[in-house]
Amino acid sequence: MNPELTNWTGTLGLPRFDLISDQDFAPAFDTCLQLAGEAVEAIAANPEPPSFQNTVAALETAEDPLNRLCAVFYTLAGVDSNPAREDLQRQIAPRLAAHGSKISMDPRLFDRVEAVMQEKDALAPQDRRLTELTLRGLRRSGAGLTGEARDRMAAIRERLAVLSTDFAQNVLADERDFTMAIADDRLAGLPDWLLRAMRAAAKERGLSGQIVTLNRSLIVPFLEHAGDRALRELAWRAWTARGDGSGAGGAKTDNRPIAAEILQLRHERAQLLGYADFASYKLEPEMAGSAENVEALLRQVWDPAKSRAEADGRQLETMLNDDGVNGALEPWDWRFYAERRRKALHDLDDAAVKPYLTLDAMIGAVFDTANRLFGLEMREFQAPLWSPDVRAWEITRDGRQMAVFLGDFFARPSKRSGAWCSSLQQQHHIGKGQRPIVVNVCNFTPPEQPGAPAYLSWDDAHTLFHEFGHALHHILSDVGWPSISGTSVARDFVELPSQLFEHWLEQPEVLDRHARHAETGEPLPAALRDRILAARNADSGFATTEYLASALVDLDFHRGQPPADPMARQVEILKELGAPAAIPMRHATPHFAHVFSGDGYSAGYYSYMWSEVMDADAFEAFMEKGDAFDPETARKLEEWILSKGDSLPADELWLKFRERKPGVHALLKGRDLIEVAS
C-alpha cells in the first residue's frame, strides 16, 4: 500500500497528492478495510470488562487508517473526478456500507457500550456525551435487530450506498457534458465580464468562441443578462433537466427511478427500527425534533415569501409585456427582469460592482474578519495539491497552530457543482492532540487569462463567507474526541456558523476596507456600497420561495408512505402550496443532491432556514452591543458555539450563548419580509 495515503508527509502534515496515483486506491482500501475490521473485532472480543477506555475511546481510533484514506479519496472524487475514480466509487460504496453495518450492528459492541453507559455518572462530561452518542448511533443503525431484520437492514444500507453514488455521478455527468455555444450575433445584453467568463469556459474545454455551461456562477448571470429569450429558455431547460433523463446523458443519467427507490428503502429502513416513517427517524436527534415542528417553521415563512414573490411577479410580467411579449412570465424570464428591475431601482450595474469584488479582495475580507473576531492569523504557503489552482494557508493564534486551510475556488468540468466545506483531518485531544485540516470548495468562474483577477458576484462573495463560517467551526474546535469535533453536530445546527458569518460581508466597514478596484486600487465608493446593500434583498420573495419549495417537497417525500412516482408527487405538492409557476424549486428531485446523493440533508433541507432563525438572532446579539466586532460577544460565540462541537446538545449550546430561545422575527426582518408578515 502506498503509505502516503494514510501517513501524510507533506508540508504541515498534508498528504503529498503528487505521490498518489489512482492505481493506489484499490489495494489501499483492501488493506485499510481489513485493518479496521481487525481493530474493531479486537474491541468487540476483548475479554476485559467493558470500560470507557477499552470500548468507547478505543472505537474513536480503531478506523484511523481507513478514515484518512477515505478523506483523501473522497476529496479527490469531489473536486477532480475522472472515470477511474468514478468506477472505484461505485465499487467501494457497497463495501464501505457493509463494513459499517458489520460494526454498527454487532451485538457485542452494543452490549459493551451499553455497559459503559450504566456507569455514565462516573465519566467526565465529554466522555459521557461521547458514550451517549455512540450508543444512540448503534441503536439507530440497527444494533438491536436480529435475524432477517438485521440482514435486511445491512442489505438496505449497501443498496442505498450504491444508489446515492449513482445519483451524484449522474448529476455530475449531465453538468460536465453540457455546453451551449453562443454565436457572436446573439450576445445582446451580456456584459464584458460575463463574456470573458464564457470565453474562459470555452478555452478550458478546448473550444473557440463563448459557451454557457451548467456551472451556477456562469449560468445564473447568463439568465440574468441574456437579452435573447430563446437562448435563456434553452439554457434554463438544460439546467433544470440535470438528472431527469433528458439531459446530455440521456437515459443513462436518469435519476428519477433512483430517487424513487431511495425513498422506498429509507422508509423501510425507518420502519425496521420502529419509526413510522423516515422523517420521524431522521428528525428525532435534530433540534427540530419532529416533522410537525419543521413544517410549522417553514409555513410561517412561506406565506409572506409567496406574497412578496407574487407581487414581484406581477411587476416583472408587466415589464415582459411592455417588451412586446404576450403571455405569462416564464421561469427563464424571472431572473432577467428581476435584474433589470434591480438595476433600475437601485442604479446598480454588475459591471461597476464586480471590479471591487475580486477573489483576492474577498479572501482578504474573510481573513480580516476572522482575525478581528477571533484573533486568527493566516500565512499562505506552497504545497503539492490536486490542482495548481488550490491554495493553502497555515492558521495560527498567538503563535499556536490552529489549522491548515485549503481553498479550491474555481470551477472545473471534473468538479461537482455547488460549494462545500470538508475536512481531511478532525481536531481532537487524543494523545498529543491533532489540529484540523479544512477544505473549502467553490465553483467560481476562473479568469480568462492566468494571473488576471477573478471577479465574484455578490452571491459568490456570500458563498465565500458562508463556507469559511463552516471552516471556523473546525478551526476553533476544542474538544477531546473526533466524533464530536467541529461540524459533527445536529444537521439543523451545522449551518448556524456558516450563515452567521455571511453577515459580516454586509458590514460597511468590511466593504470599505477590502472592496478595492482591481485596476486602480481605489476603495468602493460609499454611494455604490450603499446601493449594493440596499439591493441585497431586491428579489427575496423569489429566493425564499424557491428554497422553501424544495424544503417542503423534501419533508413531504419522507413523511408517511413514500410516493411511487416522486415527480408526480412533486407536481402535486407545488400545486397544493400554490407555488408561483414562474418560480421552480431551487433543486428539483432529479438533481436534488442534498437529499439523494447521501443521507446528510434528507428530510433535512429545512435546516438552512432553521439555522437562519438562529443566525439572524445571533447577529442581533452583536447589534445590541452596537458593534459587529464586539469582543465579548465574539468570545461567547467561540466559547459556546464554535469551539464546542457536539460536546453538548445544540439547544443547550444556543441557550448558553444567547440566554433565550430564538424567534422568527429577526429572519423575516433580515429578508425584508417583515412588512408582508405583519
Image (tube, rainbow, N blue to C red):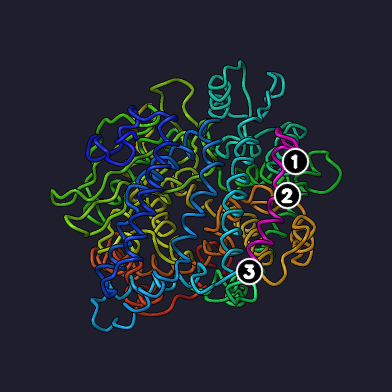
The residue where tag 2 is placed is 256
Rendered image quadrant of residue 301: bottom right
Residue 379 among magenta residues = no
| C-alpha separation, residue under disc 2 versus residue under disc 1 | 8 Å
Circle 1 crowding by C-alpha within 10 Å: few under 14, some 14–19, many from 20: some
Magenta span: 246-271
| C-alpha separation, residue under disc 3 versus residue under disc 1 | 39 Å
Which residue corresponds to the image point at 36% horizontal and 30% vertical from the top-left? 20
Image spot of residue 135 (x, y percent): 40, 73
Quick one: quadrant of the C terminus? bottom right
Which residue corresponds to the image point at 50% horizontal and 38% vertical from the top-left? 443
Q: Which mark is on residue 245? A: 1
| C-alpha separation, residue under disc 3 versus residue under disc 2 | 37 Å
Circle 2 crowding by C-alpha within 10 Å: few under 14, some 14–19, many from 20: some
Amino acid, disc 3? Val
In contact (CB < 8 Å): disc 3 and disc 2: no
Residue 255 among magenta residues = yes
Above or below, 306 against 396 in this view is below
In contact (CB < 8 Å): disc 2 and disc 1: yes
Image spot of residue 647 (x, y percent): 32, 70
Rendered image quadrant of residue 308: bottom right
The residue where tag 3 is placed is 676
Earlier sequence position, callout 2 versus callout 1: 1
Amino acid, disc 1? Gly
Q: Which mark is on residue 299? A: none
Earlier sequence position, callout 3 versus callout 1: 1
* Element on which disc 1 rests: loop
Amino acid, disc 2? Arg
Q: Nearer the viewer, residue 416 or 350?
A: 416
Earlier sequence position, callout 3 versus callout 2: 2
